[in-house]
Amino acid sequence: MKIRIIVPLHPKLIIAVLALSLLPIQGSASELRQQIIAGFAQDAKLKNSGFAGFSAGRGQTLFLSKPATGKPDTPSCTTCHSINPAAKGQTRAGKEIAPMAVSKTPERFTDSKKVEKWFRRNCKSVLGRICTALEKGDFVTFMSNQ
Amino acid sequence: MLMNSKTYIAAAFVALAFGAPAQADERYAPVRDQTVIKECGACHMVFQPQMLPAKSWSKIVDGLANHFGEDASLDADTARQIKAYLVKDAADAGWWGGKFMRGLSKTSAPLRITETPYWVREHNEEVPQRAWSDPKVKSKANCLACHSRADKGNYDDD
């Protein structure tokens, strides 16, 4: 007697179903990030009615700048985050920091409390003041394209 | 031989006098508090509270807005919780005094573990100066660069 193994699902179908089941997770990470950016946009508009959207270019300029108005040990965002957004960074105590580029670290900028906490700290350290909504939106927009 | 209580006590003394020094003993209870692990661990290894006196930990947590040249400020609730945890197991928390109290006066409150007399003595004797400028080490606060199980409270590999 021949034993037939029944394969109810074609492998391609299984892959398709798996891929679909992963989509909502990806979707929600970028959704959360979009919500955070939308919040910054609201605040930016409140401050300046002429607000015309965020700019990745301005975000990059902020990231690379050395404003010299903050604490001497942290002259730039790149002091810890490395000059290449896709590369790992390192804290001053030698701990590794995952890349800021969203393409490398998809969960970046998805937890609003975390985002606000680090903007508060790091802008104070590097710029000597808190960042504006415009600066935050520009920065997250830049990193989302990286 | 019958062991009476005197024999037990004598045996315990013998064990204390000869047993203990033979064992490696750079061990500290690892930090288990999830808030401490998350917040302190975001930038550096989570140092064990036994490495500084309570006064030091209080000063450090109260001064987080300028934490060794960085703003590491936290909301008041989180800061209070972390301070309570660190103070509870500080170097001077027990009546016997921890190792890190050696050479420290009761009133001193150093801000850096790496400036306590105990830490300095342990490292000056064995660590060549050039090791500190190795880019993989980067900072004296990077215990894990040389003590691979430091985050588990184990510094026996020195």
Image: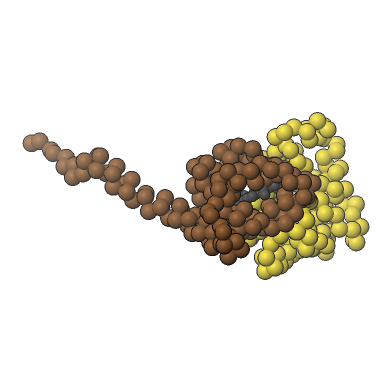
Chain colours: A brown, B yellow
At 74% across and 38% down in the image, what residue appears?
B138
Asked where in the image residue A61 lies, by quadrant, the reply is top right
Q: Is A117 located above or below residue A26 in the figure?
A: below
**In-image side of A9 versus B104 (left or right):** left
Q: Residue A86: give x, y in percent of width and height.
A: 56, 38
At 60% across and 46% down in the image, what residue appears?
A58
Q: Residue A29: give x, y in percent of width and height.
A: 46, 53
At 82% across and 59% down in the image, what residue appears?
B56
Asked where in the image residue A65 lies, by quadrant, the reply is top right
Asked where in the image residue B53 lies, by quadrant, the reply is bottom right
Which residue occupies the foreground of this view, B134 or B119?
Answer: B134
Q: Residue A28: give x, y in percent of width and height.
A: 43, 55
Q: How many marks?
A: 0
**In-image side of B52 versus B103 (left or right):** left
**In-image side of A115 versus B131 (left or right):** left
State the residue lying farthest toward the left: A1
At 50% across and 59% down in the image, what residue appears?
A38
Which residue occupies the foreground of this view, B25 or A121?
Answer: A121
Residue B148 shows in this picture: yes
Which residue occupies the foreground of this view, A89 or A134?
Answer: A134
Residue B8 shows in this picture: no
Which residue occupies the foreground of this view, A9 or A108?
Answer: A108
Q: Residue B149: give x, y in percent of width and height.
A: 66, 43
**Quarter of the image with the N terminus of chain B in it:** bottom right
Q: Is B80 located above or below residue A94 in the figure?
A: below
**Quarter of the image with the C terminus of chain B in it:** top right
